[in-house]
Image: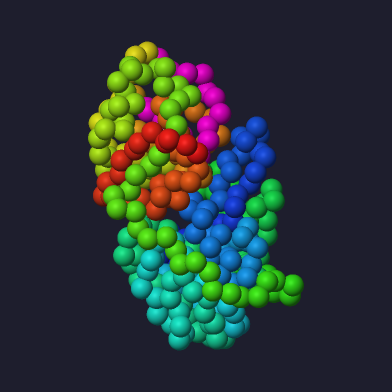
Amino acid sequence: MIEVVSPGPYAAVQDLGRHGYAHLGVPRSGAADEASLRLANRLVGNPEGLAGVELTFGLARLRFLEGAWAALAGAPCPVSGPPGAGMGVPFWVPKGAEVRLGRPEWGLRTYLAVRGGIAVEPVLGSRSTDSLSGLGPPPLRAGTLLPVGPTHGLDDITVDLAPPSEPRPPVLRVLPGPRDDWFVPEALGTLCGGTYTVSQDSNRVGVRLRGPEPERARTGELPSEGMVTGAIQVPPSGQPIVFLTDHPPTGGYPVIAVVIKADLAVAAQLRPGDQVRFRIARHL
């Protein structure tokens, strides 16, 4: 078991999400920065899809009631606790020891993986907390106990690649459409020609932006249609929203473009006040 002494501003259990239920209105959810969760799991010899803890803006304390191997990836935080504890490396946490995280130097979400994975009860095949629908375990709070899964049969622990460095400035590559025809021909140039600031209203559902407004060519709204992670919706306010993993399965605002999968981890690490730009992807 791992005891949550303090979860920080927001913390939840996440794996790679609930696939195959969008037709029933169930969001995929899962780790917002999937690449970082996969990396943390590899560092401790886990399969990449095992559940870990997603920590938003650090400032968390976790007590290990039994000794275990752990690793951290994603937004880099100061780490204190057992010798060797840090970002991007596997480290041993003795029984009774705490892992304490400070505020991240950049980025928003940090991932803690434990050898064996976080073994909370799965819901619809996933252990992820869905902040939109409420499926899965509730967000972590002080006193929450997290079970750890078995470790027999796992890969040996090896040193992996270090986490990617901070993109400066963040640029999200996009593919136009599917509803770019609802905008004037110059709208994609507006989207990709300006700089946007991340709003305080952003969360795991989507990154809300403030900046240039792509001009609409058509009035009214669409009938609700399927949405994907990375879709850039433009609501009546004109301010784009980049959908993250807890986005609703359907939506009625036109999607001017979609962030390519390779850049979703960059979008997931944007925090309020950050600036970001878009550009058309040359290839996937």
> Which residue corresponds to the image point at 68% horizontal and 71% vertical from the top-left?
155
Q: Give x and y (percent) for residue 239.
A: 31, 32
Q: Does the image show residue 69?
A: yes
Identify the image quadrant of residue 198: top left
Residue at the spot 34% in from the left edge and 26% down from the top edge: 188
Does the image show residue 201?
no
Magenta stretch secondary structure, dominant:
loop
The image shows residue 144 at horizontal and vertical percentages of 54, 68
Q: Nearer the viewer, residue 204 or 105?
A: 105
Per the rendered image, the range of residues in magenta is 220-235
Farthest front residue in view: 282
Q: Is residue 225 magenta?
A: yes
Query: Residue 265 magenta-drawn?
Result: no
189 with respect to 157 (left or right): left
| Quarter occupied by residue 13 | bottom right
6 or 81: nearer the eye? 81
**Which residue is situated farthest in the right direction here?**
153
Looking at the picture, does residue 117 appear above or below residue 32?
below
Q: Is residue 118 left or right of residue 153?
A: left
**Nearest to the observer: residue 24 or residue 176:** 176
- Residue 8 at x, y percent in the picture: 40, 65
Judging depth in this view, the residue of 272 and 281 nearest the camera is: 281
Quarter of the image that includes the N terminus = bottom right
Name the side, left or right, on which 13 lies relative to 47.
left
- Which residue is at 49% across, 28% downward? 251
The image quadrant of residue 128 is bottom right
Q: Measuring from the top left, give residue 258's x and y in whole percent.
A: 45, 34
